[in-house]
Image (tube, rainbow, N blue to C red):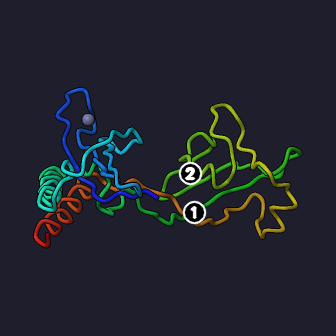
């Protein structure tokens, strides 16, 4: 049996290190020995009981980290649950053609814009329809036959409405603002 008894964020200050902040984990073992894992990467070295941090050291390290997040809006250790993406339901219209090779997307439109090739539509929409985004390739719907598509209630050569859930990256200024606010709250309640 072994367990993490304390975790402390620390800043390596290394110019070559993009993350700068790391988590230092202190481990206790059943035989009464201790170790520290400086980068929380599984690379341990043994320490004495006297080298373990006290509660004030741990609290101070977290305060310092939360101050960093409150000032920069960056959370390199992923301590705050602020979502970087959100799901958006989009209304697309699609026109299918019946071909010998199976159903083909011949035209799509959304929000006043027309798309005539698979490679023009966003990747997540192409994935949803299971069409290739490769330039020069026809937008054949993979994995279904013409009959399958009709069985699903779709018709050929007329506009068909599809609602597609697309994951959007949230603007970074909003994510940063929420991280700053979450970190300030953590500092107040610490
Ligand atoms: Zn580093």
Question: Secondary structure beneath disc 2?
Answer: helix
Residues at circles 1 and 2 in contact by the CB criterion of under 8 Å: yes
Residue matched to label 2: 124
Circle 1 packing at 10 Å, graded few (<14), some (14-19), many (20+), is some
Image coordinates of residue 117 in percent, x first then y, are 63, 41
Q: Residue at x 70, y 43 (%)?
A: 139
Q: Residue 162: which quarter of the image?
A: bottom right
Residue at the image position 33 percent from the left and 39 percent from the top? 45
Residue 128 lies in quadrant: bottom right
Q: Secondary structure at mark 1?
A: strand
Residue for badge 1:
164
Q: Residue furthest top?
A: 16
Left or right relative to 110: residue 147: right
Residue 177 position in % (x across, y down): 20, 59
**Rounded to the nearest whole Å, what is the CA distance between mark 1 and mark 2?**
9 Å
Q: Residue furthest toward the front? A: 31
Q: Residue at x 57, y 47 (%)?
A: 115
At horizontal 17% and vertical 57% (from top left) the residue drawn is 58
Compare residues 68 and 29 and report the one nearer the observer.
29
58 and 123: which one is in front?
58
Location of residue 24 in the rendering, given as x and y in whole percent from the top left corner: 28, 47
Q: Which badge, 1 or 2, is on the more N-terminal residue? A: 2
């Amino acid at each position: 049996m072994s367990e993490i008894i304390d975790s402390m964020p620390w800043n390596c200050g290394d110019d070559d290190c993009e993350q700068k902040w790391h988590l230092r984990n202190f481990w206790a073992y059943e035989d009464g020995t201790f170790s520290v894992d400086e980068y929380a990467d599984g690379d341990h070295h043994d320490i004495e009981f006297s080298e373990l941090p006290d509660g004030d050291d741990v609290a101070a390290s977290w305060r310092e980290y939360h101050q960093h997040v409150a000032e920069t809006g960056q959370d390199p250790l992923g301590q705050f649950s602020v979502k970087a993406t959100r799901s958006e339901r989009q209304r697309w219209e699609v026109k299918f053609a019946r071909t010998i090779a199976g159903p083909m997307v011949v035209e799509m439109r959304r929000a006043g814009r027309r798309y005539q090739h698979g490679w023009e539509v966003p990747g997540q929409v192409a994935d949803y329809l299971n069409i290739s985004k490769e330039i020069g390739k026809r937008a054949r719907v993979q994995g279904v036959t013409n009959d399958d598509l009709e069985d699903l209630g779709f018709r050929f050569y007329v506009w068909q409405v599809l609602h597609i859930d697309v994951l959007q990256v949230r603007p970074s200024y909003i994510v940063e603002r929420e991280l700053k606010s979450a970190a300030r709250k953590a500092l107040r309640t610490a």
